[in-house]
Structure formats: structure tokens, C-alpha cells
Amino acid sequence: MGIKLKTRRPTGIVPWPLILLEGEEGAGKTYSAAEFSASQRIGQMYWVDLAEGSADEYSAIPGADYEIIDHDGTYRDILEQIRAVHDEARRAAAAGEPPVVLSVDSGTALWRMLKTWTHERARRGNRNAKALQEDPDAAIDVGMNLWNDATERWLDVIHLLQTFPGIAIITARGKQITAIDDNGKPIQDRGRVLKEWKVQAQKDLAFDASVWVRMCRGRAPQVIKARSLQLRVEDGKPLPLPDFTIEDLVFNRLGCSVESQPRQMPALVGDRVQAWLDENNVAELRDVERLRELWWEAAGDDTGLTRAEVVSIRAAIERKVTELENPPTDMGQGPVSDADRLRAAVERLAEDGDKEPEDEPDPDRRPVRKAPAKRTAAKRTPAAKRTAAKPAAARS
């Protein structure tokens, strides 16, 4: 039986935007976002303040009405709160309510936090830690795997903003910097050092946003890019908006309405392993019995997983079970070698030495069903060689 073709007709509906407001300090980025909360055409606005500290003061803007997200400053809490707002926006959209607005101020602070986290991890690595112990000023090597982890965390936030069932706004700092070539040297043209504009956030933020607005002191805001049929921006010719407001941009120039919907953007993944692990909360589970159940459920016909994906999922579950059954020591290090495991087993036996034996042995604790052992005939051992000592007379 061939694979069934899956298609759908395009809706032609204008989707809700992800708006990037970037520019110089004091240009009005945060003010514009707070001012938008006074619009009668939107529902509740939620404000994620990241190292800016303006959310409380800007509520004094006439008509401003928004809720400040209370987070503890950790990436995990920030991500969970954004997911919670995403769920609330979906509920409001399904109920036919005005669009929920999410404002993240700022993306620059979020990326700076992830960069700091990356360098801290690099410093804790064995090679870098040894080098820093010998020379505190030594240069450290930040591996690409660490940068990939930071980018993955960034993209988790951006994907929520791109698929937000309402209006998403993210601010960032931007400024002119010296253009640098691949060798790290300034680029010159006819003796002049060239300048370029840089958005101070993860390098793909401008690409990921559907509308890109630049704000500079003393100049009208400019639309640098708009992924829209309603608002056309010619290549290399930013569109100035002297009387810029986000309300006018969203509802009049982009043409959004109550019929708008989030962009249809399924997350692109190489396989379904991580999605399955996240969906079943494997990383947070502490119940070994539940992990054993998931080990078997992964191979169910209704999961749609391939054999290779099942193998990867089961390996992850087995590692988790091993981690739970071999907790870290007081120094934070669990058994990592056969000798460590043997030593731990001996210690457990010594602790249980005075206990009464149980009627039945413990069942197999591994989440793997063992095949029954094959019966084999007992091998006959050759007769032992005679090693009796010869008489003393024979030895003399």
C-alpha cells in the first residue's frame, strides 16, 4: 500500500505577526510596546521583562494595561512562563476573544544570558578548568556543541513566538559597528572603514521575525522587512513611518483582524525521539516503575515510531533507570565504572547483612525482559592429575 498524500487548501488569511523592534537606546522601543497595551482592539497583554526593569514604570503611560510575568531569572522558568502565555492565547483564540499580546523585552538580554551560560559551561570543562587553574587569564575554548545547545534554547523561545496565537513582540538593541571580514579585520573601501548595522541578539532573529522595525533617535521609525502582501518594502529601501504605532502597523498596514491565525509552522525535527521523551516527561520522572512501563510502551503499534527511534528511546530510559538506582555520592559523583558498581554493591550487602532474608528474591529490576536461558548439557571435567608427594626415600 502506497503512502497517502496529505494536502490542504491555503486559507489566504493574514497571520498574526512576530514583530521585532530594534534600535538605539532611548529610541522608544519599550515605550511603543507599552503604549500598544492601551489599544481597544487587543485582549490581555503579557510582559516578559528581561534585565530591562521598565515594566513597572511604563504602566503609567495613559491607558497602558498589561500583566507582568513574574519569573525567577532562570531560562527554564522564563520558557515555562512563555509556554503558559502561549496556552492562554490559544484558549482566547478558540473562545473568539480579542488577540492576546506577548511582549518580550528584550531579546538582547535573553541571548546575552545564553552566551554567559555557554562560557560558564566551557570554563567548567576538564581541559579549560585545568588551563585556568594554571593560568586564570588563559583563553578558553568554547566548543561548537555548547553553542549549539545555546542556539537550541534560543530557538525554543523563538518557535513559541513564531507560532503564537496572537501578537508577539520582541525588542532588541541595534547599532552601527565596524564591518569585519572573515579574518577579524576591519573592511575598508577606498581608505574608509566600512560600517554595518547589527542587531544585538542571536544572528537569525531578523530572519525569524515577520516584521522588522528599526528605531533611531531623531528619525522616524523604519520598516526594514515585512513578510506580508499588504505591506510591501522594496529591497534596500526601508519604509519610514513618521506616525508609527504598533496598533496601526498590525491592524491597518498588515491587515490583521479577528480572523487572523498563527502561522502554520510545525517544528522541524530529524526524528521523533526527543518529542516522545518530552511528551512523556522522561527527564523529570523519578518513578522507576513508570519508566519500565514507558520502556514497553515505546514499542507499541500506535506510537508510529521506527525501530531505530524505539531503540534510542529505550536507551535513554535505561540510562535514566541506572541513574535513579545508582544515586550520586556525597561528592555528587555516582558509580561510573565496574569497580565503583562492585564497591557500591559490597557496601549495600554489608548494610543488609543483619537483616532477615526475604521469602522470595527481588524481581529483575532492569526494564528489559530476558529471554529464558537455554539448557545445555553439563560438561565432564577430566580427572584430576595425581599430585601426591613422592616418598621421602624416592626424593633422597
Image (cartoon, grey):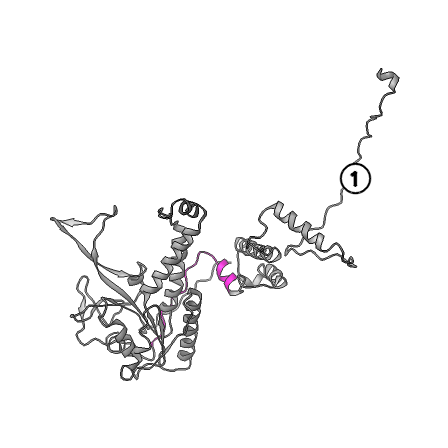
Quick one: 109 or 312, which is closer to the camera? 109
Q: 171 or 124, which lies in front?
A: 124
- Residue 333 percent across, percent down from the top left: 55, 52
Considering the whole magenta stretch, tell me its main secondary structure. loop
Q: Kindly indicate the quadrant of the structure image that contains residue 221.
A: bottom left
Q: Residue at x 35, y 48 (%)?
A: 137
Position in image of residue 86 (x %, y %): 41, 73
Is 277 contained in the magenta span? yes
Q: Left or right? Give the position of 333 relative to 12.
A: right
**Horizontal side, residue 95 vs residue 192: left or right:** right
Q: Quadrant of the C terminus?
A: top right
Q: Name the residue under label 1.
A: 378
- Which span is picked out in magenta? 260-278
Q: Give left or right: position of 164 versus 322.
A: left
Residue at 45%, 47% in the rendered image: 126
Magenta region includes residue 179: no
- The extreme left residue here reads 190
List x then y, in percent, for residue 309: 52, 55
Q: Nearer the viewer, residue 354 or 207?
A: 354
Report the number of discs. Answer: 1
